[in-house]
Amino acid sequence: MKKYFLLYTIFLFGVLTFITSCDDLFSLDETPKSFIAPEIYYNTPAQIETILTGTMRRAFQDWSGYAYDPGFHRHDDQNAGGNLVITMNYGSAIWTLHWANIKDLNHAIKAMRAGKVTGISKEVEDQLLGQLTFLRAWNYFQLVRHWGGVPLMTDETEDYFTQLPARATVAEVYNLIVKDFTEAIQKLPADWGSRSGRPAKDAAKGLLAKAYVTMATHPLNDVSCYAKAAALAKEVMNSGKYRLVEDINNVFSMDTKYGPEMMWSFNANANARSTDPRIWSALEGWGDYSAEIAWGDTVFPEQPRKYVYLELFNREGVRFNELGEGIGIRKYLYDTWENFDRGVTHINIPIIRFADVLLIFAEAENMSKGGPTQEACDAINKVIDRANGHEPNPDYPLLTTSMSKADFDKAVIQERNFELCFEYDRWCDICRKRILPEVTRPYYLVNFKESCYLYPIPEVETRLNPNMEQNPGYK
């Protein structure tokens, strides 16, 4: 009886408390007591660090973001399954994560610029602000390459909830990207020492060089940017901080995930692992991400790199076409078989690596100098020579200065196709070079139209924001 009486008393007290507080509970004038506004929160380096780690975690985590979005670049010529039928909300999850990142980064940048993070040295202040502007530039770079001009929301934007701006031009977005990467170059350290995984100065230079080489091509076609790209890439090449992994078999080993070639990547570790590795395997796993068979089997040149980057054999050594299976992505399968069978992987997916910088330089040097220079040839030939196992390969020879500018440029883009396969670069190269009709599967050419070069703005954005104009070709 005492037990039931006690329960009844507690229940009655709860009811009375609810009734007497109804006026407060439903009052529209009630001020939230536990909401922490951004302008109050960012006061310590540790709080800024939560934004740095949080934005990258949002972009790369189990079954989400760039760790698992096989469809994002499926319509290139590498990935199996792309047919150039691009639906209205194609890539909307990637769109959303970039805007969430930009919002968080802007609040943190605003706090840093206002001097609200106190008690830190100038060196630490520069390191934090350099990382913030670097990440904002990268997020906008991803948006502008896939969706074109987008609204510019910066640390100077006053109200994210009521201010719904129109889309900026592509040039205006790139102006911000250049400005942010330039500030990052000035503030980031040359080396993070044991704090691996953070973007350093050369990573900012490499990505700014990639932004410039993109600006030199479609849609801006500002050819003056080729020289800027070549100059920045050369600075990275001359810095001595990075180099190619000598043995092609070790480029994507677990021992080289933080260098000497990897400049900045999506990081995975025991505490924040990547998506189940079976998504990359067509022979041992599920083949969520797999290569177009014709591209991997016949287009990719016969060389050691082909068998290191693509999964052409199962673990018993049986070739894919004897098994009736597709071609997996071996470059992301270099964790242990034990971890593979457990569904665990700590692989890193590159965002910028030294091989990319060499190819950016080769392209930009050739295009800015009116033809291939010896330096341009030397840069790309380092990548090709390694791909061939440092042996002469008449089927995939080194490039020479006797080539025309157009032929050399085409060879560079094709080398990017093979070396950077499945690193989220091929689709962007196809779009900026406007070569989709040339490289798409012949049976999908009927679906090609110019609007394919940009993804549609997600429907929810165009419905909520009357200033958000849809990309051409999408209703």
Image (cartoon, helix red, strand yellow):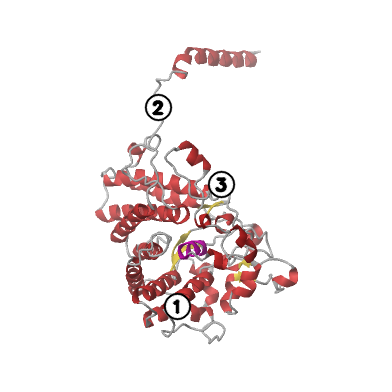
Residue furthest toward the right? 323
Say which residue label 2 marks: 33
Closest to the observer: 293 or 171? 171
Residue 379 picture location, percent across and down? 41, 78
Q: Which residues are magenta?
A: 425-433
- Relative horizontal placement of residue 448, taking residue 1 as reference (left or right): left
| SS under mark 1 | helix
In the picture, the quarter occupied by the N terminus is top right
Q: Given the image, on which type of amino acid does mark 3 rest? A: Met
Closest to the observer: 41 or 296? 296
Q: Mark 1 or mark 3: name the one nearer the start of the chain.
A: 3
Say which residue label 3 marks: 88
Report the residue at 45% width, 72% height from top: 355
Q: Are marks 2 and 3 in contact (CB under 8 Å)?
A: no
Q: Mark 1 or mark 2: name the one nearer the start of the chain.
A: 2
- Relative horizontal placement of residue 201, taking residue 473 as reference (left or right): left
Q: Given the image, on which type of amino acid does mark 1 rest? A: Phe
Say which residue label 1 marks: 408
Is 251 one of the magenta-colored residues? no
Q: CA distance from mark 1 to mark 2?
A: 64 Å
Residue 278 picture location, percent across and down? 64, 60
Q: Mark 2 or mark 3: name the one nearer the start of the chain.
A: 2
Report the residue at 51% width, 84% height from top: 397
